[in-house]
Image (cartoon, rainbow, N blue to C red):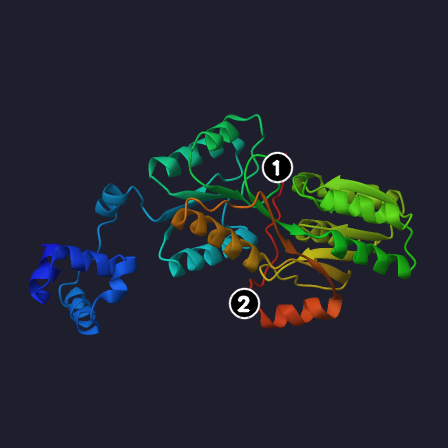
């Protein structure tokens, strides 16, 4: 039979409310005698007591559960992102409940509903629903704290501030004699704006494309046909794979990088724009839990982690020392 707080109280010889106060880390628990705390801890071990999250939720209206929604975890970036989120929530005494959309927009609403039905206290959103979509409307009506990992006008977000790093990257390429630079970035990020502004500042002719695995080969053909001798790319592995099939085109490349994804070859890479993604997700968790612990606290609408330009040598050094995966992002082969 499952042990209860009453069982612990009876074994220790104290009240049930005192046991509850100590195990829930109530602010008054610091006044409990050290010997009493020791006896409670011993009783917890001997009776194999496990708290009921359902009962705890009914008593205080909180499940101490954070929801996180993303496309999938076969992608090494998101696999590591989820693992770091899991570690940080556990460190704070919370659980993490994951919802996967499999990169299908229609699955976003279903995944969010499933998380909300499980009474999550807050949500980290790694997908990018259209502002006018049913998914966005569902998020707005949820009445729980939400933080996104992409720019948003409706919810607090934490994104990489790469404006200075991008300027340094373009300056670096300019010093190497490049006058035509192509850029490939995720559409729902601020990097396209950073890229456009930096190229304008240095009077560089540029071409901007948005990351899309199915169009990678087309991007390479476009850049080659227009004689772009350098590229700045976020989400680079698919493009690097496409370049392997086109040995005649040899642009110098600056990649978006972090400690989650390793590049098996640095042959074409001359530098990187580094973002501490681990710090980004841990900060997102901390901001969310701080809000849950103190409802009067407001999460700033725009939070940033500064990116920085790094050399190829530093990319190589980081790859040797960090714990990230040893393979690039999977490249989806198009059928037909």
Local packing at callout 1 (Cα closer than 10 Å; few below 14, some 14-19, many 20+) is: few
**Could you tell me residue 204's position as x and y percent?**
90, 48
Quick check: 206 left or right of 50? right
Image location (x, y in percent) of residue 45: 18, 67
Q: Residue at x 42, y 38 (%)?
A: 144
Which quarter of the image is occupied by the C terminus? Answer: top right
**285 or 247, nearer to the observer:** 285
The answer to whether residue 237 is left or right of residue 166 is left
Q: Which residue is at a point 78% across and 56% down the rendered structure image?
A: 253
For the N terminus, the image quarter is bottom left
Task: Give the camera-side residue of 108 and 166.
Answer: 166
Would you say the residues marked 1 and 2 are in contact, meaning their CB atoms lie under 8 Å apart?
no
Residue 177 in picture, x, y percent from top left: 92, 58
Q: Is residue 3 visible?
A: no
Task: From the viewer's perspective, tell me whether residue 176 is left or right of residue 52.
Answer: right
Residue drawn at (34%, 35%) of the image: 117
Local SS, label 1: loop
| Label 2 SS | loop
Residue of label 1:
335
Q: Nearer the viewer, mark 1 or mark 2?
A: 2
Which of pointers 1 and 2 lies earlier in the amino acid sequence? Answer: 2
- Near mark 2 (Cα within 10 A), the count class, few <14, some 14-19 or many ≥20, is few
**Position above or below: 228 against 129:** below
Mark number for residue 323? 2
Asked whether, in this view, residue 209 is left or right of residue 129, the answer is: right
**In the rendering, at what x and y percent does residue 317 appear?**
67, 72
């Amino acid at each position: 039979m499952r042990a209860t707080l009453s069982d612990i109280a009876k074994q220790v010889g104290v009240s049930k409310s005192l046991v509850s106060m100590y195990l829930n880390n109530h602010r008054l628990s610091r006044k409990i005698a050290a010997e009493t705390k020791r006896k409670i801890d011993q009783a917890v071990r001997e009776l194999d007591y496990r708290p009921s999250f359902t009962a705890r939720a009914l008593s205080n209206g909180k499940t101490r559960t954070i929801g996180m929604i993303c496309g999938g975890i076969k992608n090494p970036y998101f696999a590591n992102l989820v693992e770091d989120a899991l570690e940080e929530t556990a460190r704070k005494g919370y659980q993490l409940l994951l919802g996967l959309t499999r990169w299908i927009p229609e699955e976003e609403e279903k995944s969010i509903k499933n998380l909300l039905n499980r009474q999550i206290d807050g949500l980290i959103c790694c997908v990018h629903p259209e502002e006018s979509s049913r998914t966005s409307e569902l998020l707005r009506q949820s009445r729980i704290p939400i933080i996104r990992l992409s720019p948003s006008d409706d919810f607090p977000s934490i994104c990489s501030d790469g404006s200075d790093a991008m300027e340094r990257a373009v300056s670096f390429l300019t010093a190497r004699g490049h006058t035509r630079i192509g850029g490939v970035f995720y559409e729902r990020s601020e990097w396209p704006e950073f890229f456009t502004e930096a190229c304008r500042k240095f009077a560089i002719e540029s071409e901007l494309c948005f990351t899309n695995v199915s169009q990678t080969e087309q991007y390479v053909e476009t850049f080659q046909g227009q004689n772009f001798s350098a590229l700045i790319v976020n989400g680079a592995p698919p493009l690097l794979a496409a370049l392997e099939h086109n040995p005649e085109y040899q642009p110098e490349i600056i990649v978006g990088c972090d400690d989650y994804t390793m590049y098996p070859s640095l042959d074409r890479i001359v530098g990187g724009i580094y973002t501490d993604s681990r710090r980004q997700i841990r900060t997102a968790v901390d901001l969310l839990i701080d809000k849950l612990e103190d409802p009067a606290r407001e999460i700033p609408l725009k939070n940033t982690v500064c990116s920085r330009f790094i050399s190829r040598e530093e990319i190589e050094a980081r790859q040797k020392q960090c714990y990230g995966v040893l393979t690039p992002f999977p490249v989806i082969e198009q059928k037909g």
